[in-house]
Image: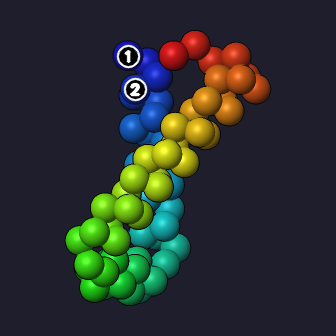
Amino acid sequence: MGFLILAIGLVLCVEGLALALAPSRMEDLVRAVAALPPARRRVLGLAALALGVVLIALARGFVGLPL
């Protein structure tokens, strides 16, 4: 349970930092993603998911974090 809370906290920190530092860029990004066809957004989401899994696996390997 602790790792889930840690993961959510890290996501919120990164998202909050992006919104705090470049709010207008985030609006542009949201508009650009909204303009993509749904199939492209799905592929983008799956790629982000795969990258996240790889990063978790690397973190577990380098730091020895249990999952």
Res 64 quadrant in image:
top right
**Is any atom of residue 1 visible in this view?**
yes
Q: Is residue 49 left or right of residue 64?
A: left
Mark 2: secondary structure: helix
Q: Is residue 44 left or right of residue 60?
A: left
Pick the front one: 17 or 28:
28
Q: Residues within 10 Å of mark 2 (few under 14, many from 20)?
A: few
Q: Is residue 2 left or right of residue 65?
A: left
Q: Residue at x 58, y 13 (%)?
A: 66
Where is residue 45 shown, x and y percent of the image?
37, 57
Above or below, 66 relative to 37? above
Mark 1: secondary structure: loop
Q: Residues within 10 Å of mark 1 (few under 14, many from 20)?
A: few
Residue at the disc numbered 2: 4
Q: Residue at x 43, y 39 (%)?
A: 9
Residue at the disc numbered 1: 1
Where is residue 61 shown, x and y percent of the image?
71, 23
Pick the front one: 38 or 57:
38
Q: Residue at x 36, y 84 (%)?
A: 32
For this orientation, the residue located farthest to the right is 62
Quarter of the figure that contains the N terminus: top left
Where is residue 43 shown, x and y percent of the image?
38, 62
**Image marks 2 and 1: residues in contact by CB distance under 8 Å:** yes
Where is residue 14 shown, x and y percent of the image?
50, 55
- Disc 2 and disc 1: Cα gap in Å? 5 Å
Q: Amino acid at mark 2?
A: Leu
Q: Which mark is residue 50?
A: none
Q: Amino acid at mark 1?
A: Met
Q: Residue at x 66, y 30 (%)?
A: 59
